[in-house]
């Protein structure tokens, strides 16, 4: 895997740390970074030993400050649409990989940066972080899913306020409205992200993946489709070795040892 702008490291617990490394550009998303993300997400999805992801930005100023505007300045309508669709497909890989992910937001998460963070399972931010979708201030529409994911996370009215004014919000407000799950000091950001994933990964692997897929199924296809998937997932997990181990461990008052089957 040849990466230009991402540091990729997998620890002994199977947690992959992806650090977008363009601090001089506030980690802005250009063509090369999107390609790096595609490779990284493909590897995470394909390797069984990688169980979860933490995504963050290099430096202390930005998670990802947005898309690289220099790549948009002279784009035609067709070129811009292709650029948007390509980024959407890469972000969707993260969102649907059935492995938990954390956006460790260490600074600005603007435009494409917030759109990337919203594809993660949870968002954990430093108190000084700023989050927003400022695209309308440049005369453009968000292109990497902002108009779709933001309303799903915080509701239509609040999302339209952010999308139509283009004004950013601080981390405390983001937590209040549910866009961010936790606020942590910079020195604790990555360690808390790992501890959150450790808590999740201690649960049944089969159940974790199916819960994530059930949520996506309902959000994408409506409640009827979601309930149908949930019932099928409940049946599958109830007949699994993990369920038998989990119930035995509960009755025996010990921690379960799940095998993912």
Image: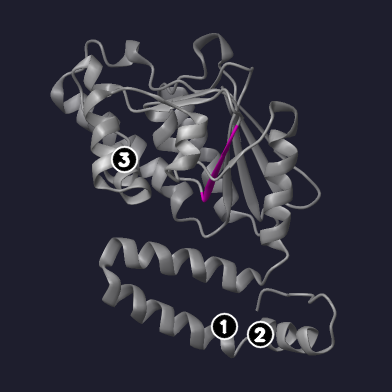
| Image quarter in which the C terminus is found | bottom right
Q: Secondary structure at mark 1?
A: helix
Magenta stretch: dominant secondary structure: strand
Q: Is residue 55 left or right of residue 12?
A: left
Spot occupied by residue 245 in the image (x, y as percentages of width and height): 74, 85
**Residue named by callout 3:** 145
Which of marks 2 and 1 precedes in the sequence? 1
Which of marks 3 and 2 precedes in the sequence? 3
Asked if the residues shown at circle 3 and circle 1 are in contact, with their CB atoms under 8 angstroms apart, the answer is no
- State which quadrant residue 216 falls in: bottom left
- The residue at 28%/45% (across/down) is 148
Q: Toward the viewer: 91 or 184?
A: 184
Q: Secondary structure at mark 2?
A: helix
Spot occupied by residue 186 in the image (x, y as percentages of width and height): 69, 27
- State which quadrant residue 114 falls in: top left
Q: Look at the image and give the residue range highlighted in magenta.
A: 121-125
| Image quarter in which the N terminus is found | top right
Q: CA distance from mark 3 to mark 1?
A: 32 Å
Asked if the residues shown at circle 1 and circle 2 are in contact, with their CB atoms under 8 angstroms apart, the answer is yes
Q: Residues within 10 Å of mark 2 (few under 14, many from 20)?
A: many
Asked if the residues shown at circle 2 and circle 3 are in contact, with their CB atoms under 8 angstroms apart, the answer is no
**Residue named by callout 1:** 237
- The residue at 57%/48% (across/down) is 101
The colour mode here is one colour
**Residue named by callout 2:** 243
Q: Residues within 10 Å of mark 1 (few under 14, many from 20)?
A: some
């Amino acid at each position: 895997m040849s990466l230009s702008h991402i540091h990729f490291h997998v620890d002994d617990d199977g947690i992959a740390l992806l650090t977008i490394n363009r601090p001089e550009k506030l980690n802005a998303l250009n063509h090369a970074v999107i390609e790096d993300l595609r490779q990284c997400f493909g590897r995470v999805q394909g390797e069984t030993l990688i169980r979860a992801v933490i995504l963050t930005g290099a430096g202390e100023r930005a998670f990802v400050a947005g898309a690289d505007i220099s790549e948009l300045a002279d784009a035609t309508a067709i070129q811009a649409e292709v650029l948007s669709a390509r980024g959407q497909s890469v972000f969707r890989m993260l969102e649907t990989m059935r492995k938990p992910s954390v956006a460790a937001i260490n600074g600005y998460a603007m435009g494409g940066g917030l759109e990337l963070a919203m594809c993660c399972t949870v968002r954990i931010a430093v108190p000084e972080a700023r989050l927003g979708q400022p695209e309308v201030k440049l005369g453009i529409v968000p292109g990497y899913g902002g108009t779709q994911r933001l309303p799903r996370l915080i509701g239509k009215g609040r999302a339209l306020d952010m999308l139509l004014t283009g004004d950013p919000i601080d981390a405390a407000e983001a937590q209040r409205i549910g866009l961010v799950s936790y606020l942590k000091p910079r020195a604790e950001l990555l360690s808390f992200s790992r501890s959150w994933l450790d808590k999740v990964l201690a649960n049944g692997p089969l159940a974790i993946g199916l819960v994530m897929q059930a949520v996506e199924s309902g959000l994408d296809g409506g409640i009827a489709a979601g309930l149908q998937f949930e019932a099928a997932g409940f049946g599958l997990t109830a007949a699994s070795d993990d369920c038998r181990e989990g119930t035995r461990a509960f009755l025996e008052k010990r921690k379960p040892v799940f095998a993912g089957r």
